[in-house]
Image (cartoon, grey):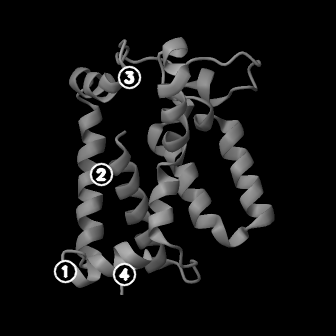
């Protein structure tokens, strides 16, 4: 899934939650967007620097149950008010459907050797071509991306972010007026 799609689904879900559930804490939605991309923001640079040459994968340690569970425990114990940010990070695993790739997701519970993400037709020598290969060889991925576009459009419409003053306020403060 592309980064902007993670962000769109997360911001739309947060808006729906705030609309329907009283007491949802206000958070800086810019941080929410970063949390939604959190595993990729950790793993993609690691892959680019070293691990891609070895594993031919950019889905690494931050995409494991160990990291997701550890983060959930830390937030619940130390910063319970940050739960929307933790849910955004955990939502990344849901949107990537990581349980379909147990060799990566359940590391190290299946042994200390890191198991590479199960490749689904996106193998290539160059990490810069990963999304190109994935989306040209797996058309079913487009449905998720179209859903992300719709979620993003809905969020922009709901918040009226097409108005320059509202957009600027959201970019500046992480909240729309």
Estimate the spatial distance between the alpha carbons at disc 4 and disc 3, rounded to whole Å: 36 Å
Between label 2 and label 1, give the one nearer the viewer: 1
Nearer the N terminus, badge 3 or badge 1?
3
Q: Are marks 4 and 2 in contact (CB under 8 Å)?
A: no
Residue toward you, 175 or 136 = 175
Indicate the quadrant where residue 9 lies. bottom left
Q: Residue furthest right?
A: 77
Nearer the N terminus, badge 3 or badge 2?
3
Residue on which the image places disc 1: 163
Percent across and percent down for residue 167 are 27, 76
Residue toward you, 31 or 97 = 31
Between label 3 and label 2, give the one nearer the viewer: 3
Residue on which the image places disc 3: 127
Residue toward you, 6 or 18 = 6
Percent across and percent down for residue 64 are 63, 34
Residue drawn where x is 50% and y is 46% of the image: 92
Residue 70 relative to residue 167: left or right: right
Residue drawn where x is 72% and y is 69% of the image: 80
Residue on which the image places disc 2: 148
Q: Are marks 3 and 2 in contact (CB under 8 Å)?
A: no
Percent across and percent down for residue 85 are 57, 62
Category of crowding for the residue at label 4, using alpha-carbon neighbours closer than 10 angstroms: few (below 14), some (14–19), many (at least 20) = some
Nearer the N terminus, badge 2 or badge 1?
2
Nearer the N terminus, badge 4 or badge 3?
3
């Amino acid at each position: 899934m592309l980064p902007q799609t993670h962000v769109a689904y997360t911001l739309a879900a947060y808006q729906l939650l705030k609309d329907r559930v009283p007491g949802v804490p206000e958070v800086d939605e810019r941080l929410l967007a970063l949390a939604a991309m959190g595993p990729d923001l950790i793993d993609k640079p690691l892959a680019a620097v070293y691990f891609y040459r070895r594993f031919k994968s950019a889905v690494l340690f931050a995409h494991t149950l160990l990291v997701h569970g550890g983060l959930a425990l830390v937030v619940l114990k130390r910063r319970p008010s940050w739960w929307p940010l933790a849910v955004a990070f955990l939502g990344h695993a849901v949107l990537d459907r990581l349980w379909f790739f147990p060799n990566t997701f359940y590391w190290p519970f299946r042994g200390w050797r890191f198991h590479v993400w199960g490749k689904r037709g996106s193998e290539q020598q160059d990490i810069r071509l990963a999304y190109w290969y994935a989306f040209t060889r797996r058309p079913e991925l487009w449905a998720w991306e179209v859903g992300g576009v719709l979620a993003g459009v809905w969020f922009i419409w709901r918040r009226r972010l097409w108005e320059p003053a509202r957009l600027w306020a959201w970019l500046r403060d992480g909240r729309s007026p």
